[in-house]
Image: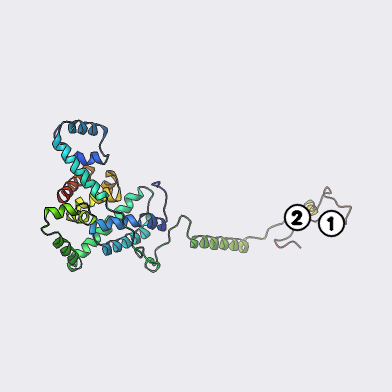
């Protein structure tokens, strides 16, 4: 899609809604939270399109998505009971698996998702933006407002930690 | 070259410069430890990329009532812009008609001849080539 082509809100929702949902789901592991976040992002896009200056649309969109996600995390941090049950269930299901269990389950989506959720946020975000959303390192750098060397390091260290958990 | 650990993921993603890529590949040809690390990174990358792209659940798009007073953005100007432009234009035309001073209309017979040929034919003495008087009148419909 050309960077300077203005989009209608409907086009953004149709083209990016599913990607935004997947980004949110892979960061949170929670379908309900991901749907809420997608709705919030689309609302912000709708409001922000009026002031959008032609440029890197994807960079603009993913910055909005990331900010909405971080706002949501901050809101939940103030109300910890909203997020804790899922977190405890997930952690208890991972407690002390035998090596055979790990080998039998590795590569199943749930395990990959659980391994993703175990990553520190910065690493998880960089890996998801790279491998789920499909952004280049330059685009990730612009989205998370970090130097490209930092992005490179986060992706690398995130993958190393994933490998340790999955193999 | 030292072990280029942090460059290995970028190598997988095609995010190295030509020079970096050459150096890393030369190192990999002689370092089995980095080769093993590359395989592990490739595994982790493939695992995340194997996750299915989930469908957006129904109802995840904001409902119309939630959009509230948000301006409807399309490539075309909104309807209210066209309506406002038409109203302003109509206002200017109306004001110009009301405020304009009386003007002199010059009605030339040859123009009338073209438009109302049947009438001029009743007066053979008058032709479009005859010098004609200039009729003066204030602005108003031609009767």
Which residue is more in the foreground, A98 or B6?
A98
Residue B82 position (above or below residue A58): below
Query: Could you tell me which secondary element the residue under label 2 belongs to?
Result: loop
Residue A92 position (above or below residue A135): below
Question: In the rendering, at what x and y percent does residue A48 appear?
Answer: 36, 57
Question: In the rendering, at what x and y percent does residue B57 appear?
Answer: 33, 62
Residue A113 in view of the camera: yes
Alpha-carbon neighbours of circle 1 within 10 Å: few (<14), some, or many (≥20)? few
Alpha-carbon neighbours of circle 2 within 10 Å: few (<14), some, or many (≥20)? some
Residue where numbered disc 1 is placed? B118
Q: Say which quadrant the N terminus of chain B sits in.
A: top left
Residue at image x 23%, y 43%?
A: A148
Say which quarter of the image contains residue A149: top left
Residue where numbered disc 2 is placed? B107
Between circles 1 and 2, the one closer to the viewer is 1
Apparent side of residue B42 relative to residue B107 in the rendered image (left or right): left
Residue A67, disc = none
Which residue is more in the foreground, A62 or B36?
B36
Apparent side of residue B128 relative to residue B88 in the rendered image (left or right): right
Question: In the rendering, at what x and y percent does residue A136 appear?
Answer: 29, 44
Say which quarter of the image contains residue B6: top left
Q: CA distance from mark 1 to mark 2?
A: 17 Å
């Amino acid at each position: 899609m050309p960077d300077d082509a203005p989009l209608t809100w409907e086009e953004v929702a149709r083209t990016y809604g599913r990607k935004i949902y997947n980004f949110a789901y892979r960061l949170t592991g929670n379908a309900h939270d991901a749907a809420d976040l997608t709705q919030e992002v689309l609302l912000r896009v709708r409001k922000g399109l009026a002031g959008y200056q032609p440029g890197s649309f994807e960079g603009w969109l993913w910055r909005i998505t990331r900010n909405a996600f971080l706002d949501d995390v901050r809101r939940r941090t103030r109300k910890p009971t909203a997020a804790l049950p899922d977190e405890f269930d997930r952690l208890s299901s991972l407690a002390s698996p035998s090596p055979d269990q790990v080998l039998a389950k590795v590569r199943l989506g749930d395990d990959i998702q659980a391994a993703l959720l175990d990553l520190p946020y910065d690493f998880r975000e960089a890996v998801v933006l790279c491998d789920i959303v499909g952004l280049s390192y330059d685009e990730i750098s612009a989205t998370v407002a970090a130097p490209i060397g930092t992005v490179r390091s986060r992706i690398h260290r995130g993958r190393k930690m994933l490998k340790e958990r999955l193999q | 070259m030292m072990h280029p650990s942090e460059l290995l993921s970028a190598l997988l993603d095609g995010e190295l410069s030509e020079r970096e890529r050459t150096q890393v590949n030369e190192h990999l040809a002689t370092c089995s430890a980095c080769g093993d690390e590359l395989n592990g990174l490739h595994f982790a990358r493939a695992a995340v990329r194997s996750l299915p792209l989930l469908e957006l659940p129904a109802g995840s798009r904001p409902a119309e009532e939630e959009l509230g007073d948000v301006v409807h953005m399309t490539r075309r100007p909104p309807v209210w812009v066209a309506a406002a432009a038409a109203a302003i234009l109509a206002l200017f035309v109306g004001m110009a008609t009301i405020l304009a001073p009386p003007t002199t209309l010059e009605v030339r017979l040859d123009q009338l001849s073209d438009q109302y040929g049947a009438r001029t034919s009743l007066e053979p003495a008058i032709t479009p080539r005859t010098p004609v008087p200039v009729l003066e009148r204030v602005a108003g419909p031609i009767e």
